[in-house]
Image (spheres, helix red, strand yellow):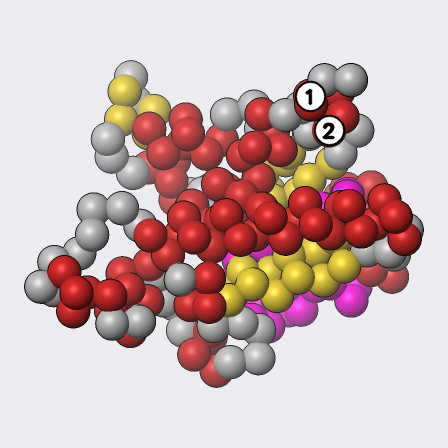
Amino acid sequence: MSVKNGFSDLLILDFSRYLPGGYATQPFADWGARVIKVEDTDQGDFCRHDAPTRFGVSYYSTALCRNKDSISLNLKDEESLQACLELAKKADIIIESFRPGVTKKLGIDYETIKEKNPTVIYASISAYGQDDPLSKKALHDLNMQAQAGYLSLTADNAFPLPLVDYATAMVAGQALMAALFNREKTGEGAYIDISMFDCF
């Protein structure tokens, strides 16, 4: 059996933005899983608008959105929310990178989804984890490189690669694969709380 055929039955909903979630789900899309990016109705994933671009398409978008489907939903609209929950009932994996507490307000948090889909694997990415007050702030890769002390090793020059984002994506991908393997053996879903700072 090819890798692609082995993953082709998976449905993944990706509510994340930028690299950490998008890079984590990209291999699944390349292996044949159906990955649906759930984007807002304003700008969608910010990576779609970042330079450099070619023919009006961001390189980041090409790298992080290939082989994926995309839908645009206003989750504050009841009809859109219900449509999203119908998808969530069928999802094998859900990944999100909202600040802690936002999914609860939107009605797409793990506990709500689990009631409808007990075997779902649900991953949350935040700066310091779901229970740390610092994760409620809008922190990004460079902030965490500085707070970890990494920038002091580079004479305060930012490294050209978003190392925290990449490290988080790799940990997230590994955790999702482990959770899938465990579900295959036990039939149980999982909740994965991913701290970007801890991944770095």
Q: Which residues are magenta?
A: 91-112
Residue 31 visible in the shown view:
yes
- Above or below, 116 against 13 in this view is below
Q: Residue at x 81, y 55 (%)?
A: 189
Residue 170 rendering spot, x and y as whole percentages? 50, 48
Query: What element does badge 1 sit on?
Result: helix
Query: What element does badge 2 sit on?
Result: helix
Q: Is residue 120 left or right of residue 159?
A: right
Q: Is residue 96 magenta?
A: yes
Q: Can you identify the residue that label 1 sits on?
A: 4
**Which three-letter amino acid code belongs to the residue tagged 1?**
Lys
**Which three-letter amino acid code belongs to the residue tagged 2?**
Phe
Residue 151 rendering spot, x and y as whole percentages? 19, 65
The Cα–Cα distance between marks 1 and 2, rounded to whole angstroms, is 5 Å
Q: Residue at x 42, y 68 (%)?
A: 197
- Above or below, 13 against 96 in this view is above
Q: In the drawing, what numbered circle is on residue 7?
A: 2
